[in-house]
């Protein structure tokens, strides 16, 4: 068209035209990608927990009514949290074992802040069922801790996986003792 | 494209389902009149507005609760708690307005350039069906936040059905699922509000099908006679549509971010109260002209008939307009009456916004009579008596030399050569 020196080859005046067009093309493409991402983000992010759900993220709980040997289940972020007032025998059983061969080796002292209080999320690490063993009369498994009825995972008195398909010990949530008997979970 | 079609995977798919040839035929090589102006952007914009409504609507439904005691609170939950919930809701509520603006311009464009005339009558009808479905969807969507305007808007609109003799009361109770607008009404409105947009998508597909049979009308209103009259849709009109989309999104973004409640009613932020009607009830702006016609007629049944008739009469437009010439460009008298009609609709809208008292009653009545007179008196007579200007030989002629009918031809020719 306007280029009469096309014999100069692709690096001539014609080539400069193409560079300019390429730049516009890439700049448009980049802006489109940024725009698309900016639109996609709120459409995805709205599915994450909303402010009212996040506001439930910590609770305070008074342990004092729980007698030795008793367990209580509290709801935290919609999940069951097991609070067990362990007997001296249970504490001994949790400590007097060789943890080396455990699937998820963890010392009992790493799982509790005060030995008599075992606080953990009562959700089986296999596929999310709630293990039995909180109420008297429920099966507690081979190690006198908890037993998951869904796929047969046995947890000991420290909530560690001993037999069964679960990959990890029962999770210990983040918590602090606000006083001797009041804890704040989360 | 040639190279793309040689790709073995593309060829494997193409042999089984010729989707690429179809897309190429309908979106890339698709012959489009070479002289389309920016008024032809509004069809694709309407499609995009529909997609925006569906996407944001589905996401809002993740968080909304269609239950009379919880609906209002769940909308506030979306506004305050849900991540970007305010954005999604404002895009959806203002998106409805943007959708109507775009569709109204699309409709008026069709009226100005005679796009409803043979052989595009069914295309026109399908567009009107889409408009009616949009109105139903928008109305039911407005009920969902369950504020005062939602509740009383629903009450007034559904009560229109009581105007019909014999079956009126039965029909209205059926709509309500009770003796007043209540939880059953809200539930079914939510269900239908979710359903209708997908039905609109279905009608849009048929609308496009009908469009692609005889192709787009154009500012000259004459048929394409050969390849010299057309341009491939891509890249010429994809780029033109994209440019229009940019402007559309700018206006949209201004509404969403700077005036999200400008087109809404403050009273809808008061929870629905079945025992108290707000002092001044107004529908959303896109219903105002029709609302004016309803109020202009001092009889319940005739008012409702007038209101529905205002949209229904558009179905007969291809026969009420008896002129053989499509485009207003060559119809000097029609052109003036067209703008008078646009003004009349705007006046009806303005009257609808104001309380029905004093001057507004008279203006509303005059404007309502004129609305129908435009279709029933002016258009049929114009076709008989108007002296139209001579039509150019073809779309391409003024552009490719041979005639000086179209002053913009030179510019178009330049674009084509560069």
Image: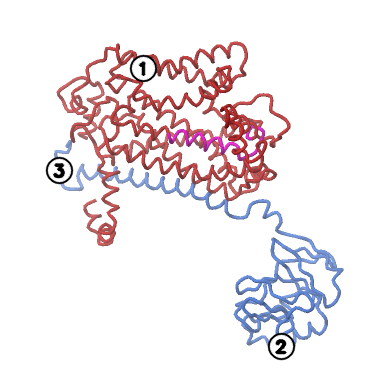
Front residue (pair B227, A19): B227
In the image, residue B340 above or below residue B69 = above
Q: Which badge, 3 or 2, comes first in the chain's sequence? A: 3
| Residue B132 painted magenta | yes
> Mark 3 touching mark 2, by CB under 8 A?
no
For this view, does B247 lie left or right of residue B172?
Answer: left
Question: Residue B379, labelled with which disc?
Answer: 1
What residue is shown at x 69% (from left), y 88% (from top)? A98
For this view, does A168 lie left or right of residue B205?
Answer: right
Look at discs 3 and 2 and give the one toward the viewer: 2
Tell me the element at label 2: loop
Q: Residues within 10 Å of mark 3 (few under 14, many from 20)?
A: some
Mark 3–mark 1 distance (CA, rounded to whole Å): 59 Å
Q: Which residue is mark 2?
A: A97
**Same-chain check, marks 2 and 1:** no
What residue is shown at x 29% (from left), y 23% (from top)? B326
Q: Main secondary structure of the magenta part?
A: helix
The C terminus of chain B, quarter of image: top left
For this view, does B358 lie left or right of residue A66?
Answer: left
């Amino acid at each position: 068209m306007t280029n009469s020196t096309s014999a100069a080859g692709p690096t001539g005046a014609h080539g400069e035209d193409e560079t300019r067009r390429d730049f516009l093309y890439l700049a448009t493409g980049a802006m489109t990608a940024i725009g698309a991402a900016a639109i996609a983000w709120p459409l995805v992010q709205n599915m994450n927990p909303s402010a009212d759900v996040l506001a439930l993220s910590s609770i305070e709980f008074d342990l004092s009514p729980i007698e030795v040997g008793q367990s209580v289940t509290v709801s935290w972020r919609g999940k069951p949290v097991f609070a067990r007032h362990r007997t001296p025998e249970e504490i001994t059983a949790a400590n007097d074992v060789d943890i080396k061969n455990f699937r998820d080796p963890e010392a009992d002292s790493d799982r509790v802040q005060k030995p008599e209080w075992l606080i953990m999320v009562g959700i089986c690490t296999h596929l999310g069922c709630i293990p039995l063993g909180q109420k008297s009369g429920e099966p507690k498994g081979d190690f006198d801790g908890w037993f998951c009825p869904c796929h047969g995972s046995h947890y000991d008195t420290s909530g560690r996986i001993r037999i069964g398909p679960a990959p990890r010990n029962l999770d210990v949530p983040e918590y602090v003792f606000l006083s001797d008997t009041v804890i704040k979970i989360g | 494209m040639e190279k793309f079609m040689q790709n073995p995977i593309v060829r494997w798919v193409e042999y089984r389902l010729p989707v690429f040839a179809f897309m190429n035929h309908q979106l890339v090589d698709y012959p489009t009149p070479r002289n389309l102006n920016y008024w032809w952007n509004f069809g694709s914009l309407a499609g995009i507005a529909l997609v925006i409504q569906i996407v944001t609507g589905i996401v809002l439904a993740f968080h909304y609760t269609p239950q009379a005691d919880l609906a209002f609170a769940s909308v506030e939950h979306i506004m305050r708690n849900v991540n970007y919930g305010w954005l999604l809701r404002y895009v959806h509520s203002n998106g409805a307005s943007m959708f109507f603006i775009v569709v109204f311009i699309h409709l008026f464009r069709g009226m100005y350039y005679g796009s409803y005339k043979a052989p595009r009558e069914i295309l026109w009808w399908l567009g009107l069906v889409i408009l009616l479905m949009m109105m139903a969807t928008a109305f039911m969507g407005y009920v969902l936040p369950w504020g005062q305007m939602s509740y009383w808007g629903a009450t007034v609109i559904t009560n229109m059905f009581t105007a019909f003799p014999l079956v009126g009361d039965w029909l209205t109770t059926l709509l309500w699922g009770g003796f007043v607008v209540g939880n059953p009404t809200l539930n079914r409105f939510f269900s239908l509000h979710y359903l209708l947009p997908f039905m609109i998508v279905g009608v849009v597909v048929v609308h496009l099908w009908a469009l692609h049979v005889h192709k787009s009308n154009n500012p000259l209103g004459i048929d394409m006679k050969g390849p010299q009259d057309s341009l491939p849709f891509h890249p010429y009109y994809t780029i033109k549509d994209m440019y229009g989309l940019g402007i559309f999104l700018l206006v949209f973004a201004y509404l969403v971010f700077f005036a999200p409640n400008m087109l809404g009613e403050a009273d809808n932020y008061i929870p629905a109260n079945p025992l108290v009607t707000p002092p001044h009830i107004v529908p959303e702006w896109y219903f105002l002209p029709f609302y004016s016609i309803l109020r202009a007629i001092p009889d319940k049944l005739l008012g409702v008939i007038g209101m529905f008739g205002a949209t229904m009469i558009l179905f007969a437009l291809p026969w009420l307009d008896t002129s053989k010439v499509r485009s207003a460009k060559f119809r000097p008298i029609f052109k003036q009456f067209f703008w008078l009609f646009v003004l009349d609709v705007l006046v009806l809208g303005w009257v609808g916004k104001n309380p029905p008292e004093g001057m507004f009653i008279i203006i509303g009545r005059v404007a309502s009579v004129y609305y129908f007179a435009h279709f029933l008196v002016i258009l049929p007579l114009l076709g008989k008596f108007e002296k139209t200007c001579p039509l150019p030989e073809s779309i391409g002629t003024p552009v490719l030399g041979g005639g000086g009918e179209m002053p913009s031809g030179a510019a178009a020719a330049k674009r084509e050569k560069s």
